[in-house]
Image (tube, helix red, strand yellow):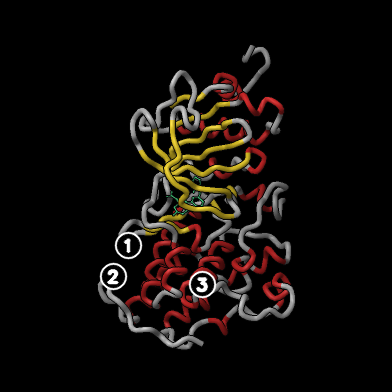
Amino acid sequence: RAISENRSVEECMVDALKGSVSNEEPRSLIAIAKMWKKSIPDSEDSVQNEGILLTEELKAVDYEYQERIHWTKLQLVGSGSYGEVFKMQDKKTQFQCAAKKLPFGCFRSEELTTCIGLTSPRVVPVYGAVREGPWIMIFMKLIEGGSLGQLIKESGFLPENKALYYLDQVLEGLEYLHAHDILHGDVKADNVLLSKDRSQAFLCDFGHAVHLIPEDLRNSRMSDDYLPGTQTHMAPEIMMGMHWSSKIDIWSSCCMTLHMLNGCHPWTRDSSGPLWFKIAHEAAPWKEVPVSCNPFTVDVLRAGLQKEPSRRASASELRGKVELAQQKVSLRRFGQEEKTSSHS
Ligand SMILES: CN1C=C[C@@](O)(C#Cc2ccnc(-n3nc(C(N)=O)c4cc(F)ccc43)c2)C1=O
């Protein structure tokens, strides 16, 4: 049937995977993610249990993997516009990981197709995805230190050297993603996870990610199912509906840095006029850089907050400036308390 109908290998693979959960290779998960994107939530939701697990630590049993039967939620670790994230445990192996739960109708295949197979130490590894009725569960490595957004909320703001330290690691992750033609699309502190000792940072949440395939990008300013990221971190070219590129992640990483330094998102201290208009037509949020910052840190933000994307630094270029600023800013051994710095 496959040959006679000239069906692709991928379509045949998906046929074989439908309606069951199995431990397979990453390409099977890519295939089923694309199938989910094409299918619409239907009355069969209640019976659907299908998906792919990429690690033997999560074990499908008789081609099923269902909450409460094969795995259990331990605690809520995060929630936001993306849905909810739980710490979970496999009942057979006792293995624990994180699970993001989102409505089937909100699922974008790019959330999986962009992060499967990535090996950067700055990206959270994905362990699989399973549909259970009207829900999609995406399993990934548990990162015990919580998010950078939670750290900023706890601390009020971060000292300059810590802000540069985390920005450097985020830019390392963006260097890797951009070299693999992937745009993250929602770089912000809530989407940066920290190791238990908070020395290591990891990018997560590919729900807004885009494959930067040049010919497609030239034609589409935003594909029809593109989900905009966080408005306060959105680059001017997006607000103006112009061509966009990996440089939007650079702008967002500098907005995240202002959030670390000030304890609040950029543009939020002045409530005059619509946000989109300010981002599109006003100067970059220069005045928000704390007066106490080292000139080399100001140079980092100047290079990353250029309104014209072609003049904006790439991840590699900006990382070089960050590492220079780190040498200038009194960087002591990580984790020592810092004197509070004055803020504008
Ligand atoms: C690889 N992959 C697969 C799904 C993905 O697009 C996501 C996500 C996401 C969004 C927001 N938050 C978390 N989040 N994850 C954890 C964790 N893994 O331990 C976590 C822990 C928290 F304390 C708070 C939020 C958290 C994870 C993605 O990137």
Task: Give the residue drawn at x 42%, y 42%.
Answer: 74
- Residue 334: which disc? 2
Whichever of callouts 3 and 1 sits on the residue coming sooner in the sequence is 1
Q: CA distance from mark 2 to mark 3?
A: 20 Å
Helix, strand or loop at mark 1: loop
Q: Residues within 10 Å of mark 3 (few under 14, many from 20)?
A: many
User: The disc labelled 3 sits on which kind of residue?
Assistant: His
**Dot 1 and dot 2 residues touching (CB under 8 Å):** yes
Report if residue 126 is visible in the image: no
Task: Give the residue drawn at x 39%, y 47%.
Answer: 142
Residue 306, given in percent of the width and then of the height, sits at 58, 74
User: The disc labelled 2 sits on which kind of residue?
Assistant: Phe
Task: Give the residue drawn at x 56%, y 74%.
Answer: 305
Helix, strand or loop at mark 2: loop
Q: Of all residues shown, which one is farthest toward the left?
A: 333
Whichever of callouts 1 and 2 sits on the residue coming sooner in the sequence is 1
- Residue 259: which disc? 3
Is 53 located above or below residue 188 in the figure?
A: above
Whichever of callouts 2 and 3 sits on the residue coming sooner in the sequence is 3
Q: Which residue is mark 1?
A: 199
